[in-house]
Amino acid sequence: AARAMEALRELEDEALGKRASGPDPDAEREAQAKRQRLASISDAERARREEVARTLAAGDALGEEAETLTEASMKRLVLALEKRVTENIHMRAKYADQPDRFLESEIELFGAVRRLQALAATPELYPAFVATRCVPTVLGLLAHENLDVSVAVVDLLSDLTDSDTLVEAAEVEAADALVGALLEGGAPQTLATNLRRLDEAAAEEAEAAHKTLQVFESLLEARPTLVAAEIVGKTDLLQWLLARIQVKAFDANKLYAAEVLSILLQSAPEVKGAVADVDGLEGLLRAAAQFRRRDPQSAEELELVENVFDCLCSCLLLPRGQTLFLRAEGIELMLLTLQERAAAARGALKALDFAVCRNAVCCERLVDARGLKTVFALLGGSLALPAPRGKRGKAERRALEKDDDEHLANVLCSLCHELTGPYRQRLLGKFAEGGFAKVARIVDLRTKYVDRVAEFERAWAAGRARGVGEEGDEEDDHFLGRLDAGEFTMQLATVAVAYLLCSGSPELSREAVLQLHAADTPLADVAATLEALHESIGQEASDAGLTSSKEKIAALLADVRRLLERVSKASG
């Protein structure tokens, strides 16, 4: 009722000239004439219009109680909508300067759109609905001059493409028909254009923006690669999302924009390049900078922070993204965020990991920005990441700790892989500081995850003895279980230890051997771990970056084996 009455009031306001801008005398005379025409409308006519609005609202309220649509009743609704569209076009053309004359056709059109929402309750009718060729008509109404009609269409599309509804529709092979028709009709372009004209200061339009994002999310889930290509190539949605997450005030739409952007970046490789094309890295860094010192005030705002950093990390998978991140002083921002120990520090460590991975220039920038002090403070424990917020179970806290350790170990590995000359000497000097305390810490980190993987293996063996698990999934489950326990983190820590063993510094090499001995870890275990890591990279290597990593691990493994031979000969 509120929407229909508001539509009525807006059209009356337009007739009264309340939206006229400037003191133009001609406009004033026209407004005065409109006031006189409106004044001539009888009280009975006003009452009739209000009754139309109330009747429409009552019909909406009773919609849920209506009987389930059949194909025949659905076609009647479609026919009624087409009739109302034609009538509204005719009335608007005939009485372009007299909004009160096409008011009733506008309300009836609004009602016809709303009544079609009943279709969402019967997704098995989607193919029949598509066959009526009504989808282009519905999409065309998104550009209607009356924003209330456009908002009603957004509501309709949101209901029809709701993820639960599409899942139900997929069960009867009906979802593809609707999604295909929407894409063929240019839904991404039309929705993105309409999104630009919504004023989120108005609650109803803010809700429409939220539902528009919901439609995009549903389409991306249904056909990720195709929809992502449509969005990047034919709309400015990417720019809208990037601008929206930079707005300082937090609300549900800012959160949803970050979520849709994160989904979009994971849907197709070209999206990452498109973000770079529109200076998106700088926008993401500005969004992240809002939380350098300030903690999120709610669980929803914390989710926003996580989405922003996930978007950053997706872009950093490309070398071009790393370069733009470097130019925008992203490494410096991440280091400052870590030093502040706010909730965003965890995301900053992850972004730093992605930034320096296989990138010597970024590694050198980290050293130049005095980042070694920050990284080794994390390793030594003098700088701690913030405790997880909210109630989390032991398993969740343990998984979060494993992720943090993995990112830290990977940063150290990247530095060991990439730094040469004076930069490498500064790195090795950090390990030697404080009586080689950091050597002990990296060996402790390795031992921690060796123990966790061993714990998993014992639990796995016990489960197999009891006959737990399906034989067909045994190998995959075992592999994933080892990863969840921290096998990759253990491998990364092993790489760092191996670099110390083969650093060329007798002091560091001797200390690493002593620490391994104290942890009851023979050099043969280090070699075996490196060999397993080398083989796993070989199975997945499909680009130059991974091939380079494989070669570096192979060279490191050869050095460790030579060291092992020398130690064996000396002890023999």
Image (cartoon, rainbow, N blue to C red):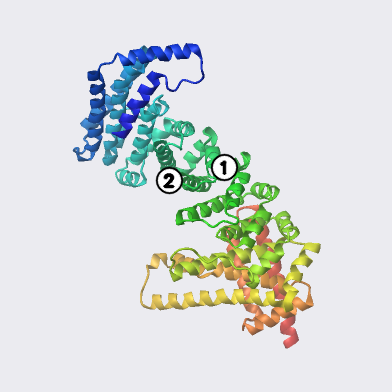
**Residue corresponding to mark 2:** 221
- Does residue 378 show up? yes
> Image quarter for residue 412?
bottom right
Seen from this angle, which residue lies furthest bottom? 572
Q: Is residue 71 above or below residue 463?
A: above
Q: Residues within 10 Å of mark 2 (few under 14, many from 20)?
A: some
Question: Viewer-proximal residue, 542 or 218?
Answer: 218
Q: Amino acid at mark 1?
A: Glu
- Does residue 565 show up? no
Q: Residues within 10 Å of mark 1 (few under 14, many from 20)?
A: some
> Image quarter for residue 155?
top left
**Residue corresponding to mark 1:** 270
> Image quarter for residue 175?
top left
Of labels 1 and 2, earlier in sequence is 2
Q: Is residue 231 above or below residue 537?
A: above
Residue at image position (78%, 62%) is: 423
Could you tell me which secondary element the residue under label 2 belongs to? Answer: helix
Question: Viewer-proximal residue, 421 or 216?
Answer: 216
Q: In this rendering, would 172 be left or right of 311?
A: left
Residue at image position (36%, 72%) is: 468
Q: Amino acid at mark 2?
A: Glu
Residue 167 drawn at (x, y percent): 34, 47
Residue 255 drawn at (x, y percent): 48, 48
- The alpha-carbon separation of the residues under discs 1 and 2 comes to 17 Å
Question: Viewer-proximal residue, 531 or 104?
Answer: 104
